[in-house]
Image (cartoon, rainbow, N blue to C red):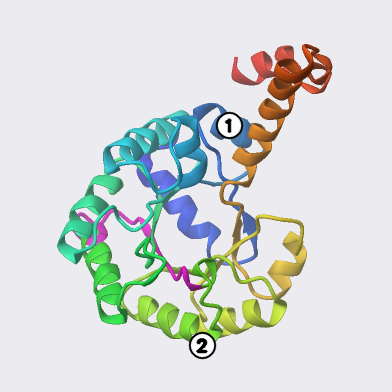
Amino acid sequence: MLLTTADKRAAFKKLHESGCFIIPNPFDVGSGRALQHLGFKALASTSAGFAWTIGRADNRVTVDDVCTHLTALCAAVDIPVNADYEGGFAVEPDSVAANVARGVKTGVAGLSIEDSTGDAAKPLFDFTLAVERIKAARKAIDADNSGVLLTGRCEAFLWGQQDIKLVIERLQAYSNAGADVLYAPGIKTKDDIAAVVKAVAPKPVNLLIGAPGLSLQEAGDLGVRRISVGGSLARMAWAGVMKAAKEMAEKGTFTEFANGYPGGELNKMFK
């Protein structure tokens, strides 16, 4: 039975009440449906993974591109989708709010807003502006009582500012500004993860795992509520494509095709 958007949003909220779950990141409709087929209870889009499917670098897609992608992904699966909405595709709070309102209309159950500027010389928005951007996103989400969960992201660790006190100060401020979930991609040590969880409790924390490290059980033991994997699944898919393609280009042989996923199984899954 197909779930309504309201059903998906209610289910997503319930997932955040206890335990720890994996929210994998499909990069297109097919990978989204495959992940649902495997039994995952929710999905998260990936800005990088999607960008690569249309031949662009991460953070080089438009709000139009992303909303079209999210609409298709949400319609294709019967489970909640959380949107990697980058920085809201704008700087000023009013513009962020307008774009968030567009994002809500795609059918997503959750949506995240980053505080990175994209400028290596000044990688994070000023504290006050960053908080105002979260407040604006919150107001846009609540305008029609959508029930979409807002995730506030501090990107400091990804930009080389590995100051856990700075991260915690920002996440607490984003929580106070209306974020339902807090997220600091790049934190890896158990001490840092536990510190973030404690600092924003009782609100849930999302943890990014993009390489071998903590298990679901270990992350859950630290108090993490959900785990996403960013562009990792997309990179795994590209690894297979590039390895086989390089073999053809450089050797004129086709041995890597023996490692392909069976077409019959794919047809059965998508039937």
Task: Please report the residue visible at 57 percent of the width from the left and 84 percent of the height from the top.
Answer: 198
What residue did someone put label 1 on? 31
Task: Please report the residue visible at 38 percent of the width from the left and 54 percent of the height from the top.
Answer: 86
Left/right of residue 126 with respect to residue 162 in the rendered view: left
Mark 1: amino acid? Ser
Q: Which mark is residue 112?
A: none
Q: Position of residue 102 (x, y in %)?
A: 24, 46
Q: Position of residue 201 (x, y in %)?
A: 52, 81
Q: Position of residue 33 (x, y in %)?
A: 56, 30
* 168 up-or-down from 217: above or below: below
Q: Quadrant of the C terminus?
A: top right
- The CA distance from mark 1 to mark 2 is 37 Å
Task: Please report the residue visible at 49 percent of the width from the left and 68 percent of the height from the top.
Answer: 159
* 1 up-or-down from 174: above or below: above
Task: Please report the residue visible at 54 percent of the width from the left and 47 percent of the height from the top.
Answer: 42
Q: Considering depth in this image, is 3 or 154 the residue closer to the camera? A: 154
Left/right of residue 45 with respect to residue 37 in the rendered view: left
Quadrant of the image occupied by residue 212: bottom right
> Which element is circle 2 on?
helix
Quadrant of the image occupied by residue 228: bottom right
Q: Residues within 10 Å of mark 2 (few under 14, many from 20)?
A: few
> Which element is circle 1 on?
helix
Q: Which mark is residue 165?
A: 2
